Image: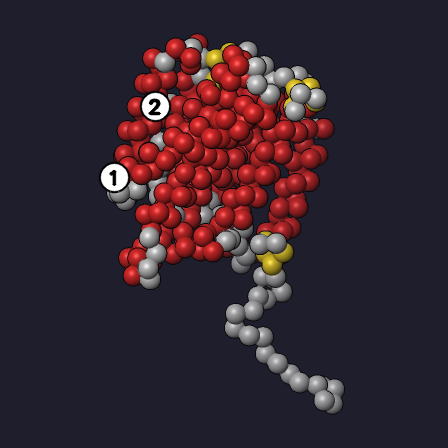
Amino acid sequence: MAEGSIATAPSPGAPSVDEEVFFGFTRPQAAAFLALVVIVVASPFVIYPFFLMKLLCFALFACAFNLLIGYVGLLSFGHAAYFGMGAYVSGYAAKEWGVTPEVAILLGGATGALLGIPFGWLAIRRTGIYFAMITLALAQMVYFFCVQAPFTGGEDGIQAIPRRSLFGVFSLDSDFAMYWVVAGVFLGGFLLIHRVVHSPFGQVLKAIRDNEPRAISLGYRTDDYKLMAFVLSAGIAGLAGAVKALAMKIATLTDVLWTMSGEVVLMSLVGGLGTIFGPVAGAAFIVTMQTYLAEFGAWVLVIQGVIFIAAVLAFRRGLVGEVGHLLKVKL
């Protein structure tokens, strides 16, 4: 040691080199996010953009769902309601009102958030299986409303939804052009969720998840925090549904069916609950499997069931969760 130098130990609360923070990201997370951006930017040049748009829409949907279950501990079986209604409103506004894509997307996100206010207010009064069953019942009410409502088109849905031009300038008729809008919305939603999770608000959500009675004893109004998280999650789910309607040019009853809620649960579990990148990996895995195994028809559901069982037994933390555990980093 050089003369006059002072050896100091790192303070207990200081981040290590591996945990150094960049705008809320740890080093491993920053590297993973950079890799994600590179993949998103490069993929349309080698993979069909239509498939990629579907993947990114469901990845954002899964991220929205994971915000609620992974960081608040609330298992919703009714997230298809916000996803589907966002798709319907966005599609109807674009087709019948002639609004531009950005307005249609915002309307879809606002629809999901507005629907999440009364639904969340009712559901958060219970926890566990009771919360899950309330959200499922409310989502079924939305489904039957969509069956009867004239603007949804019934079993035919809203078809041939026009994409028009972004800001009235950039035409989105081609899948390649539309892809960049979908990618931008996905990355923006991903960063928003990351920022929420790593904010003081997010720390309170984690405290509620881990020990709600203690959070209450510390003076936090936990119901208010849970409601805000619920509405935010519903709004992002509606945003994902809106982008999906424009990208796929269709909104149908499948978007509000209970099986859609089951799929997003599967995506989050396979990817890894409570991880930032888990839902993205889970959505990519499930959507890819559905697309490339479609030739097996109804057997796709059987294959999904087998994979789900294998994932739960072999990867209890999910794909990304297990990778993070092996590397001893948080992803």
The circle on residue 323 is none
Q: What residue type is labelled 1?
A: Tyr
Q: In percent of the image, x 51 and y 18: which residue is there? A: 93
As helix, strand or loop, the secondary structure at mark 1 comes to: helix
Q: In percent of the image, x 66 and y 41: which residue is there? A: 37
Q: Name the residue under label 2.
A: 142
Q: Which amino acid does label 2 sit on?
A: Val
Whole-percent x and y of residue 287? 52, 29
Eyeballing the image, is 81 above or below 297?
Answer: below
**To which quarter of the image does residue 44 belong?**
top right
Residue 26 appears in the figure: yes
Q: Nearer the viewer, residue 64 or 230?
A: 230
Q: Nearer the viewer, residue 132 or 234?
A: 234
In the rendered image, the quadrant that contains the N terminus is: bottom right
As helix, strand or loop, the secondary structure at mark 2 comes to: helix
Q: Mark 1 points at which residue?
A: 130
Eyeballing the image, is 214 above or below 131?
Answer: below
Whole-percent x and y of residue 63? 49, 39
Left or right position of 301 against 322: left
Eyeballing the image, is 24 above or below 105?
Answer: below
Q: Earlier in the sequence, mark 1 or mark 2?
A: 1
Left or right position of 126 against 318: left
Residue 262 appears in the figure: no
Residue at the extreme right: 2
Determine the CA span between mark 1 and mark 2.
19 Å
